Image: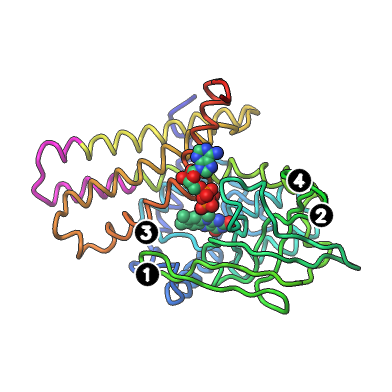
Amino acid sequence: MDLREAPHDAAFRAEARAWLSQHVPTKLASGDTAEGFAQHLVWERKLFEAGWAVVSWPKAYGGREASIRQWLIFEEEYYRANGPQRVTQNGIFLLAPTLFEFGTPSQKDCILPAMASAQTLWAQAWSEPGAGSDLAAVRSKAVRVEGGWRLYGQKTWCTRASFCDACFGLFRSDPDSQRHQGLTYIMAPLTGEGVEVRGFGRLDGDEGFAEVFFDGLFVTDDAVIGEVGEGWRVAMATTSSERGLTLRSPGRFVAAAERLNALRISRDTDPELDQRCLDSALNAEAYRLFTDAAVTAMSQGEELGSRSSLMKVFWSELDIELHETALAILGEDSALESEWLKGYQFSLAGPIYAGTNEIQRKIIAERVLGLPRR
Ligand SMILES: Cc1cc2nc3c(=O)[nH]c(=O)nc-3n(C[C@H](O)[C@H](O)[C@H](O)COP(=O)(O)OP(=O)(O)OC[C@H]3O[C@@H](n4cnc5c(N)ncnc54)[C@H](O)[C@@H]3O)c2cc1C
């Protein structure tokens, strides 16, 4: 692995840094509130117009055909410039990789440009009340009818679904099937006859979370991604990307560690807090280097595979550590410093979403360490 930045990557970094330093908005409300979501859309559309929304995608869909390494560079610069959370992330980081791998040409042509330009907003509708960690327990069903499918069932914990136009998830299309068999990966609108979105608030007060109820919503055959009955394979092909790379790239944590250090310098800290800041900075750097090594391996034909579970546990625990240290430095002022406090509240969800850390540790034990299942 060559740690030096190639000249074309350095030029890419300089271009991104120059643009972001001129354009990143200073203060947006949380993207998980209606007001903040609308503000974020203005920003996401500006990113798209300047060609920075989906840098690694083909030009035909609004990208720049940047390499994965350049995408990581962009992310570093984005968070370094204090860029806002991406409210398009469920589309561009979760659904898009699935479409690139399994979508038909017409699905890609119809869906990807509107997704990249933040014209169609996508929610992930995977979890159900009885199917979270155990996703194969999905009970929502797709019933075959002329020209398509009717959807029934309940999805839950759908991030920002209250503000989105459409969703994607697994539906049981074979009524006699069990577990991983007989599932189909389907995209569905969130408005219309036969679908109801019920928003509910998070503990931090943001209201974007939602449950989605399907009661006979009709979708045409071209809403299916991949083969009918092959939904599990389609879903699993892109989960490692969610856990390990696209959802939480290292730039976010390297930037947070830098901000933590700036906070430390601005306050009266003791040696123990200084040490905690140093540990977080080293851990963020370790995550960056591990990701670089993974990307190098991928460029040589390897899969991200179970590395993504190691990454997921590492970034989610690092995020809590960074925020806990910031709150310890701030002491009573934490209540006033809403950015660190809000970040802390959200960091506590990190070990739960994108596959809980208990499940990731099981995967690491079995597939990385080779330990027996029992
Ligand atoms: C902030 C946030 C955003 C989310 N966004 C979305 C979204 O946009 N779309 C979506 O579909 N879902 C979303 N989720 C849901 C998330 O994917 C689920 O919460 C997660 O998969 C866990 O499922 P569960 O909540 O049903 O918990 P359960 O699966 O019931 O687990 C409860 C506890 O038991 C543990 N556990 C379960 N099975 C095992 C086992 N076999 N071995 C050891 N321990 C086990 C778990 O680790 C956990 O600690 C989000 C969740 C959060 C917190």
Marks 1 and 3, how far apart in space?
31 Å
Q: How is the image coloured?
A: rainbow
Give the prevailing secondary structure in the magenta stretch. Answer: helix
Locate residue 135, reporting x and y percent: 63, 48
Task: Give the mark toward the camera: 3 or 2.
Answer: 2
Q: Give the mark, 1 or 3, whose residue is nearer the N terminus.
A: 3
Q: Give the mark, 3 or 4, whose residue is nearer the N terminus.
A: 3
Q: Can residue 69 be seen in this snapshot?
A: no
Q: Magenta stretch containing residue 261, yes or no?
A: yes
Q: Nearer the viewer, residue 105 or 89?
A: 89
The residue where tag 2 is placed is 175
Compared with 178, 338 (above or below) is below
Determine crowd level at label 4: few under 14, some 14-19, many 20+ residues with C-alpha closer than 10 A. Answer: some
Q: Nearer the viewer, residue 368 or 362?
A: 362
Determine crowd level at label 2: few under 14, some 14-19, many 20+ residues with C-alpha closer than 10 A. Answer: few
Q: Give the mark, 1 or 2, whose residue is nearer the N terminus.
A: 2
The residue where tag 4 is placed is 178
Marks 1 and 2, how far apart in space?
39 Å
Locate residue 340, reporting x and y percent: 27, 57
Q: Secondary structure at mark 3?
A: helix
Locate residue 289, reporting x and y percent: 42, 31
Query: Do residues under tags 1 and 3 come within 8 Å of each other at their CB atoms?
Result: no
Q: Could you tell me the amino acid type at mark 1? A: Gly
Q: Secondary structure at mark 2?
A: loop
Write the residue at 58% across / 70% down.
164
The residue where tag 3 is placed is 21
Q: Give the mark, 1 or 4, whose residue is nearer the N terminus.
A: 4
Marks 3 and 4, how far apart in space?
52 Å
Q: Which residues are magenta?
A: 255-275
